[in-house]
Image: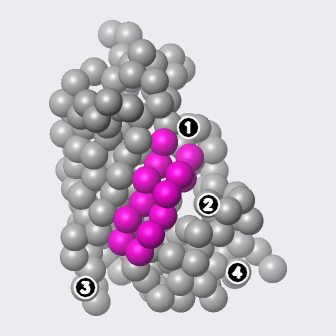
Amino acid sequence: MTLIETRRGLSGLEYFQRVLAGEFPAPPMLQLMGIRLVEVDKGRVVFAAIAEERFYNGTGVAHGGFAATLLDTALGCAINTTTPPGKRFTTLELKVNLTRPLTIAAGEVRCEGVAVHVGSRTATAEARIVDRDGKLYAHGSTTCIVVESAEVPNG
């Protein structure tokens, strides 16, 4: 049985709990970028990552796409932790605010995503990227839309 077939029978929270426990691998995009799930509850997730030099742009800071990916991951996954088996949401709109340059000097940053509203067709969430001292590097919000098939996992 494939992971997608297995996931069809799991709620979003059950799926992310199994990823956190190491029973399922993280999605390939997260593996590529070194983004790790470190906490999960219904309607809330926390991911951690380091803005390594391989993510830098020509000005010597992490490309905005790094922060956007981290935010999009936490936002969508926070919403998906609220879903029953077979129901999934995917990003419809993403708003990103980059508040300060992010570099490897920040160390490991955490991105907490929290579901704000989960309806029958759309959902919203908010997230923040902070360093170990709570300094804010970026924040964002999303609107997600229902994707009935579990063949389009968000994360």
Res 20 label:
2
Label 1 SS? helix
Give neighbour class at mark 1: few <14, some 14-19, many 20+ (Cα, 10 Å).
some
- For the residues bearing labels 2 and 4, Cβ distance under 8 angstroms: no
Residue 92: tell me if it is visible.
no
| Cα gap from disc 2 to disc 3, whole angstroms | 26 Å
User: Is 37 on the left-hand or right-hand side of 59?
Assistant: right
Q: Quadrant of residue 68?
A: top left
The colour scheme is one colour
The residue lying at 18 percent from left, 30 percent from top is 99
Q: Quadrant of residue 117?
A: bottom left
The residue lying at 63 percent from left, 79 percent from top is 7
State whether residue 43 is above or below residue 57.
Answer: below
User: Is 1 on the left-hand or right-hand side of 65?
Assistant: right
Q: Which residue is mark 1?
A: 33
User: Is 72 on the left-hand or right-hand side of 15?
Assistant: left
- For the residues bearing labels 1 and 4, Cβ distance under 8 angstroms: no
| Cα gap from disc 2 to disc 1, whole angstroms | 17 Å
User: Is 87 on the left-hand or right-hand side of 123?
Assistant: right
Res 6 label:
4
Res 119 label:
3
**Closer to us: 92 or 52:** 52
Label 2 SS? helix
Give neighbour class at mark 4: few <14, some 14-19, many 20+ (Cα, 10 Å).
few
2 or 1: mark nearer the eye? 2
Residue 123 drawn at (x, y percent): 26, 75
Residue 120 drawn at (x, y percent): 28, 89
Q: Main secondary structure of the magenta part?
A: strand
